[in-house]
Amino acid sequence: MNPVAAEGVPDRRIVSDPRPTLHAVPDPVPQPVAVRQLAFDELDTPLYDTTFVVVDLETTGTSPDGDAITEIGAVKVRGGEVLGEFATLVNPGRAIPPAIVHVTGITTAMVYEAPRIEAVLPGFLEFAAGAVLVAHNARFDTAFLKAAAARQDIAWPNPQVLCTVKLARRVLTRDEAPSARLGVLARVLGASTTPTHRALDDARATVDVLHALIARVGNQGVHSLTELLDYLPNVTGTQRAKRAFAGDLPTAPGVYLFRGPSDEVLYIGTAVNLRRRVRTYFTGSETRGRMKEMVALALRVDHVVCAHGLEAGVRELRLLAAHAPPYNRRSKFPRRGWWLTLSDEPFPRLVAVRTPTRTALGPFGSRADAVDVGATVAEFAGLRTCATRLTRAARHTCPPAIVGGCPAARPDGDLDAVAYAPAVRAVRDLFTGRADTLLRAMLDRIETHSAAEHFEAAARLRDRTATVVTMLHRTQRLSALARIAELIVALPDGAGGWEFSIIRYGRLAAAGVARRGTPPMAVVDQLVAAAETVIPDLGDAESDGDRTGSALFEGGTVGSPHRVATEREPLPRAPAEADRADATSAGPRVPVAAVVTDPPVPAPYADDALFALAPPPEDAVPPLRGAPPEEVGVIARWLAKPGARIVRTSEGYREPLHGAARWIGWAQLARAAATTPSAAEQYLSER
């Protein structure tokens, strides 16, 4: 299918309270950058041409982790002109403390029908995209926004941030402004709006304060964004001296590498604009102590130019794995995750391993997390947790226990391997999405606890079940992507062109851009021809093919040979559901599949996710076929962006019919219930 251009989103947007309008290959050798002085015309954007989004938040308290946002107000300005405003109340999912009501005037009743932050945050991030984020005491506001993004698994866009508190302390003397509070600065600088502790009013007042401070520094030769950030008080001499490192960097997207005295890689990052991003390390906007220490050690900056953001993100992950730079804290060891899998013995147990095998769940961040999920699954499947070595002819003899004990213990006697097999089958069916019987059993137990007024036990099991569902959904979603031999996807570049990605077995094989006016399919054909060849890890399936009677699964089929559908083959469908299926390999969003409405529980809690109708999943191969989990995750998030289009695919995207996708809405509600009393009441009342 030829891509269809997406409609542009206008820059000017005025949003009314309380609900906002929501719009929707081997790595190249890094190129060294020579150090030289920046020319005047290479300085960053002039202040009169810089777009600022001034934001203010009202919250239920001061802790980003324990409190929630109640109101967002933002004003977009450029050159002294207001381009748009964004304002909305936000339902925090809990009662607003009386002390906060006294300060802000926002009551629980006012936010009762307001949208949740899950609906508001994407619209705000779109409104602020590409602009410098300004806030009064920016650390407070950005901390809440980052925490909200993390809870929704939204990648923080890492915008340039300017704090008017820091700027005011640099520009104004104590005699002029004895305090840097917004009310004091608004009065001293003659702001036209008086702060009222309401988000939009405070954002408008901050705009006036920002403009007044910029006018003051203009008399001191500060005329560009770089000069303004450099003017802030916390810029060290070392940072200023090394600002020229960014001089020869291009303005294209890519990956940058700071190198130390022995040419070792100190830090790796990505940027939409390499020159602009690297410059921020030498300005007052960089407040992290580790980064200042890294800049002091760095002697040069290398870079890799990329076609678009997805390629930059993938190359960053690969370079992090190759170099393990000391100043990066995440993604340095992509293979260190833990997976939950069935042990290879006559009486299998769930074990945590580093390398995923067939029927694996993960990856988990720690072994303890994997063990906790394994204990929950084993409890409801009746899978043994004892470490006794049992041969094929042995019997499981653990006695029943009132509290704890081995879940495989039976009051009616011992178990042989044949009688034990259904427990193994239940776990395999849960992991592969063939059945959700165990999830239903967990839900029934929660309802039993609630009916008996054992609310603490119900809450603990609710949280454990939500964790199981979340991990199942993540594994099945990424596995569905890693199963596709070749997937070609296009995303609008915002300028009338298209960003293309060739994805093979969950890995990025090629990336390119068709600028406006360039025939897009010609670019696609060139990318396919030059794309990296990806050989998936099929595990035992390469040599074993169809096998029965395995030690893992007595009397059942372990898996089926690996199969790749051709472009001309129709999408596979489950026979019993074929009359309701409407799956197609091309469409407006990724993934595209058929809506499953049966069974009704927990469908009422599911969001608009689509579920694929497909044959039973292949469980004789590792879930991601050897693809790095973080790379598959980055690709999956890119595919879910608004405007993504499937150009061509070797086979349809499909998730298991009885997989965790239909339960993810319930899990989100359960997680909200764990932290918000009102959500807990809703959860219990709707059960």
Image (cartoon, rainbow, N blue to C red):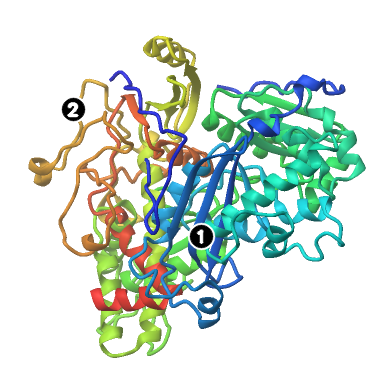
Residue 117: % across, % down: 43, 59
**Image quadrant where one finds the C terminus:** bottom left
Kind of residue indicated by mark 2 = Pro
Q: At numbered mark 1, what does the secondary structure look like: helix, strand or loop?
A: strand
Above/below status of 25 relative to 222: above
- Residue 569 occupies which quadrant of the picture? top left
Q: At numbered mark 2, what does the secondary structure look like: helix, strand or loop?
A: loop
Q: Residues within 10 Å of mark 2 (few under 14, many from 20)?
A: few
Earlier-in-chain disc, 2 versus 1: 1
Above/below status of 644 relative to 336: above
Nearest the viewer among 442 and 663 is 663
Is 75 situated left or right of 522 in this image?
right
Residue highlighted by disc 1: 352
Residue 143: % across, % down: 61, 59
| Labels 2, 1: front one | 2
Above/below status of 479 relative to 684: above
- Residue 256 occupies which quadrant of the picture? top right
Kind of residue indicated by mark 1 = Ala
Residue highlighted by disc 2: 570
Task: Identify the residue shown where x is 46% and y is 54%.
Answer: 87
Residue 404 is marked as: none
Is 137 situated left or right of 150 in this image?
right
Q: Report whether residue 442 is seen.
A: yes
- Structural distance between the alpha carbons of marks 2 and 1: 38 Å
- The answer to whether marks 2 and 1 mark residues whose Cβ atoms lie closer than 8 Å is no
